[in-house]
């Protein structure tokens, strides 16, 4: 793995869609950070059933708890009904989420070890089925578009989901392009109220600092799926939603699709140029 001069560039290998650095480039939103309040506003709604901080995260990264409406004499608290969940109810005999992360890690290591042999196109083909299986791109797409999701036609939704999926695979294929003895290690998995699980993972980097990050998974009818990656308390979903919203408000849905397609093409071109 090439040694990167800046931490956020190394991070893009793991939280594959930290878009303030990978989508807009030198534009106005490049390099923007997300405040803890903005982070909570997004992840608090997505992961309300958790209602507490993820393992290994400090102050300012706790997930927002469900709001309680106050009313009546003395400020009595009126309980609100919990939001409907699309996840499949938890069952004791269901497998844990760790195998999903192990499968992804193994595929990434193989892509790194065989990077020169496979080239960009070969790494893309190797990683595609694993990434499609590991991530819940439908849920991710809905969350990052926020209220704009409801304005799209079924055809536009399907197009955006596929574009996000291809972009995720392309980013992995482009970033994991050499090997320097790295290895992944899964530290722990913790359930939260039966519907979500978090898997804390570390990448051991020889002669460099280890990189720790947390996968958030939810149960679907097809098994456990990744919906978020958090690094140093920052949510990948929150970053994506913030930048996507800005692009949508300024340039519209078609412009967002075009930017994603442009980055997919850039990854292929830049990766092939490195090996020529």
Image (cartoon, grey):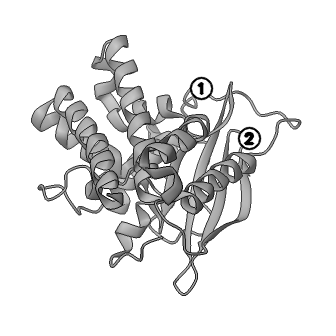
Looking at the picture, tell me which residue is in the foreground, 9 or 108.
108
On-image quarter of the C terminus: bottom left
Q: Position of residue 215 (x, y in %)?
A: 58, 54
Which labelled disc corresponds to residue 86? 1
Residue 237 appears in the figure? yes
Res. 133 image quadrant: top right
Which residue of the protein is positioned furthest toward the front in this rendering?
276
Residue 125 shown left or right of residue 12 in the figure: right
Which residue of the protein is positioned furthest toward the bottom in this rendering?
207
Residue 93 shown left or right of residue 111 in the figure: right
Question: Disc 1 and disc 2: Cα gap in Å?
Answer: 13 Å
Residue under label 2, please give it. Answer: 194
| 81 in relation to 55, above or below | above
- Give me the residue at 57% from left, 58% from top: 114
Res. 84 image quadrant: top right
Residue 19 shown left or right of residue 134 in the figure: left
Q: Position of residue 275 (x, y in %)?
A: 36, 59
Q: Position of residue 48 (x, y in %)?
A: 55, 43
- Give me the residue at 66% from left, 56% from top: 199
Q: Position of residue 53 (x, y in %)?
A: 57, 60
Which labelled disc corresponds to residue 130? none
Chain-order first, disc 1 or disc 2: 1
Looking at the picture, tell me which residue is in the foreground, 194 or 31.
31
């Amino acid at each position: 793995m090439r040694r990167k001069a800046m931490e956020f560039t190394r991070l893009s290998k793991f939280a594959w869609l930290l878009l303030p650095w990978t989508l807009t480039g030198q534009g106005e939103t490049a390099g923007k950070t997300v405040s803890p309040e903005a982070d909570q506003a997004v992840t608090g709604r997505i992961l309300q059933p958790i209602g507490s901080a993820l393992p290994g995260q400090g102050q300012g990264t706790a997930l927002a708890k469900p709001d309680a409406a106050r009313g009546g004499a003395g400020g009595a608290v009126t309980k609100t009904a919990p939001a409907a969940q699309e996840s499949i109810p938890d069952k004791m005999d269901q497998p844990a989420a760790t195998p999903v992360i192990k499968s992804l890690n193994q595929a990434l290591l193989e892509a790194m070890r065989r990077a020169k042999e496979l080239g960009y196109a070969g790494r893309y083909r190797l990683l595609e089925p694993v990434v499609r299986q590991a991530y819940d791109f439908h849920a991710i797409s809905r969350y990052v578009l926020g209220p704009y999701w409801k304005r799209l036609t079924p055809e536009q939704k399907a197009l955006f989901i596929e574009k996000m999926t291809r972009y995720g695979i392309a980013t992995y294929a482009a970033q994991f392009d050499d090997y320097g003895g790295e290895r992944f290690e899964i530290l722990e998995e913790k359930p939260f109220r039966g519907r979500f699980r978090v898997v804390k993972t570390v990448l051991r980097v020889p002669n460099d600092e280890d990189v720790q990050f947390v996968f958030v998974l939810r149960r679907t009818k097809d098994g456990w799926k990744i919906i978020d990656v958090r690094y140093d308390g920052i949510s990948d979903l929150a970053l994506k939603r913030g930048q996507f919203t800005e692009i949508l408000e300024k340039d519209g849905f078609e412009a967002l699709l075009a930017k994603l397609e442009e980055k997919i093409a850039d990854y292929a071109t830049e990766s092939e140029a490195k090996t020529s």
